[in-house]
Amino acid sequence: MTTDTIVAVADGVMRITMNRPAKKNALTGPMYDAMTAALEKADANDEIRAVVIAGAGGAFTAGNDLADFLATATRGEENRAGHFIRKIATLDTPIVAAVDGVAVGVGTTMLFHCDLVYATPSAKFRMPFLDLGLVPEAASSILAPARFGMARASEYILLAEAFGPNEAKDLGLVNAIVAPAALEATAMEAARKLAAKPAGALRAARRLMRGDRKDIEAAIERESAAFAKALTSPEAKAAFTAFLNRTKG
């Protein structure tokens, strides 16, 4: 297990911490692998009744580490981000997210698959896929319009506008805004409450609330195909090159 991803289990709750604060917890292939493996363990272990996902150092995650992501794509390696997305979208174990600071790209889209989301006043959400010549993922192409309404979803996906915790709460993406010092305790308390519920009934209720899983899986597959095509486009190559040149400057 990479030290960039810390996994701990106590009191029936698995806590997954993205632990790369110097890079605002930007996600690499090994981090995706570690998180996917942790989620698979959560679903396979009856003793794990809830999952908390958090970031270290005042950030949730800046999304993909673009240098790592582009290098992986260039080498033709398996889509490790895709494995994580598919797993979190179909997880039977309930998920609580604790969002502090930036939540970019998958840092926002993964929240559609969390049951409870708590954020600090400094939380900042953004889905900048189009700015990189790419398309949305994690079924956000259908979940954002369903949750936000088409007009607001267009603002946040097509215009790639950032939004804060108050907007996220109004949109139904965030349950509550809490002080940074209280974020961990709030998320863990909610997870322990979930873990104390009858497990079978809880999982059944989640499935009923979320509807047909096949719709989500189908959306992810459509997005994945479009994403792979977009990734090889001149638009995406130019956007990635410009971004990487800025980070070197």
Image (tube, rainbow, N blue to C red):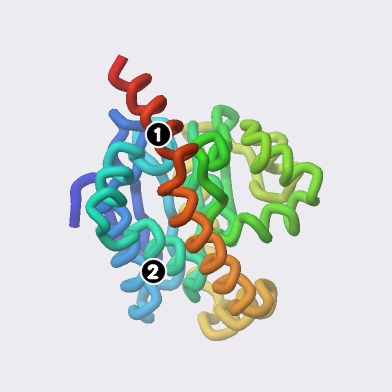
Picture quadrant of residue 13: bottom left
Above or below, 204 against 222 in this view is below
Reply above or below: 217 against 162.
below
Which quadrant of the view contains residue 160? top right
The structure residue drawn at horizontal position 55% and vertical position 33%, both measured from the top left corner, is: 123
Q: Which residue is mark 1?
A: 240
Gap in angstroms between the C-alphas marked 2 and 1: 41 Å
Direction front: furthest residue: 234
- In front: 128, or 25? 128
Query: Hey, what amino acid is under mark 2?
Result: Gly
Where does the image place residue 74, in percent across and percent down from the top left? 27, 48
Q: Which residue is mark 2?
A: 12
Tag 1: Cα neighbours inside 10 Å, few (<14), some, or many (≥20)?
Answer: some
Q: On screen, 199 above or below 100?
A: below
- Disc 2 element: loop
| Residue that appears at 73% across and 43% down | 154
Of 16 and 242, nearer the camera is 242
Is 110 or 115 nearer to us in this picture? 110
Closer to the camera: disc 2 or disc 1? 1
- Quadrant the C terminus occupies: top left
**Are discs 2 and 1 less than 8 Å apart at CB?**
no
Q: Which element carries disc 1, helix, strand or loop?
A: helix
User: Quick check: can you spot residue 194?
Assistant: no
Residue 214 x, y percent position in the rendering: 60, 79
- The label on residue 178 is none
Q: Residue at x 37, y 30 (%)?
A: 241
Q: Amino acid at mark 1?
A: Phe
Residue 8 at least partly seen:
yes
Please state the horizontal and vertical placement of residue 31, each as a whole percent of the image: 28, 51
**Dot placed on the residue nearer the N-terminal end, 2 or 1:** 2
Q: Residues within 10 Å of mark 2 (few under 14, many from 20)?
A: some
